[in-house]
Image (cartoon, grey):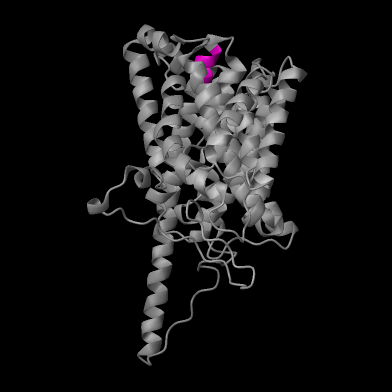
Amino acid sequence: MSGSLVDDESRSVHPKADPMTKTAPQPPRRARRIDPNNFHLGEVLRANTAGGVLMLIATLIALVWAFLGKHGYEAFVEYPIGPYTVAEWASDGLLTVFFFISGLELKREFTEGSLRRPADAMVPITAAACGMAGPALVFIVINVLGGGTLHGWAVPVATDIAFALAVLAVAGRHLPPSLRAFMLTLAIADDLGGIIVIAIVFSTDLSFAWLGGALACMLLWWILQRRRVDNGWIYLPIFLVCWFCMLHSGVHATIAGVGLGLLTRNTPEALNEPLDRWQHVLDPWSAGLVVPIFALTNAGVHVDGQLFAALWTNPVPLGIIAGLVLGKFIGILTGSWLTVHLSRARLGDGLTWGDMIAAAELGGVGLTVSLLIAHLSFLNNPEVYDEAKAGVLAGSTISAILAVLLLQWRTAVHKRWRREKARAGRALRAGAGAAPVRTGTGPGSTAGA
């Protein structure tokens, strides 16, 4: 998950709902084409694919750098800047901005989005929960049977939604808009689960004094928001002090960003709220700087024959790969199927189980949060840490390739259905009659492939 999780039309200048008018929710629109005569870098970085593309480029640079000059790469990421190294500043410092945006997006969903009415999002929410449990179970089984360690069970549970949405935007742009809505809601719930895992599992040697300081900053932030103090410069020192206190509290520093994001004011009926303004300002910085720097400092691993063999023989990287490729797929698909068949919840408009198969595999693309959890899990074991990073990259790559193939298959199926529907419509208008559409072969049919 990099950049931002929500689509362009639902953020930045997000139109607030009119409480006096009840209108049906509109499907997500396609991302606007960027006019080359009116070029703005910020708008480019807010585009659906920008964060994923930049993160991919930074990851490739890190891999090539580590392969050609392992010692030079290690010297770069371990170079001290003040009390921390470059890698630590990226993981514990810059990434807090990314998690602050995640907190803002969660707040938006809780106040005016899909999570405001969980019943409307039951399928993707349950799919997200099962999509976290599945990879963890796969990792645990492989490591128990293979004599590995259970420390990395949380590495494959996360979905990198920015990269996943970039894949969907390229390979599945002709699929129903409800598929993107499903992935967005799943990602929001998945983010919340990942944040809880980081806060609980990786909190060690708690200092209640520092934690109290962080909570006091959050309380002050909440009071100022309640009193509608909107000068952003007032909040900057509160953010920095809260981050510093959280960094020394034993709880991972990025949790400060999430907490402050959730406490930011967002009234559905009001326009130009702090949540809208701050997300509009910070999105390009997150997609264009924060996440690529994190990928550059954490994705580099020297891949040689020994490490490549370890991916398929050692239980830790094998468990991560299997968790992302198989565990995510099984978990998301099983959670969706059980929810639809055991409740009144239904799939989105135009979606079939064939589409859900593609979406389930797309959920196995995990980079940013998976790399962060690998960093937290194996920081004191460099050899296993390298294997875990390589496992995340390999599993995400395999999942992305399989998802592209499945999305192209579903695109071809939907195009065929649309052609058949158009021919039937033309035949009816010509008065020649039309053959009935075959049961179970069209979009929305529960029997559709």
What residue lies at 36% left-to-right and 26% top-to-bottom?
60
250 sits left or right of 55 in the view: right
User: Where on the picture, by quarter, is residue 114?
Assistant: bottom right
Coordinates of residue 389 in the picture (x, y in percent): 50, 21
Tell which of 195 and 280 is nearer to you.
280
Coordinates of residue 78 in the picture (x, y in percent): 45, 10
- Residue 79 vs 199, above or below: the answer is above
321 sits left or right of 433 in the view: right
What residue lies at 37% left-to-right and 78% top-to-bottom?
423
Tell which of 72 and 316 is nearer to you.
72
Whether residue 331 is visible, yes or no, is no
Residue at far right of view: 208
User: Where on the picture, by quarter, is residue 293?
Assistant: top left
Residue at far left of view: 37
Tell which of 59 and 426 is nearer to you.
59
Coordinates of residue 412 in the picture (x, y in percent): 39, 59
For the image, the number of numbered tags is: 0
What residue lies at 65% left-to-right and 62% top-to-bottom?
346
Coordinates of residue 65 in the picture (x, y in percent): 34, 17
Whether residue 314 is visible, yes or no, is yes
Our reading of the magenta stretch's main secondary structure is: helix
User: Where on the picture, by quarter, is residue 63?
Assistant: top left
Query: Residue 124 magenta-drawn?
Result: no
Region rendered in magenta: 384-388
- Residue 3 vs 372, above or below: the answer is below
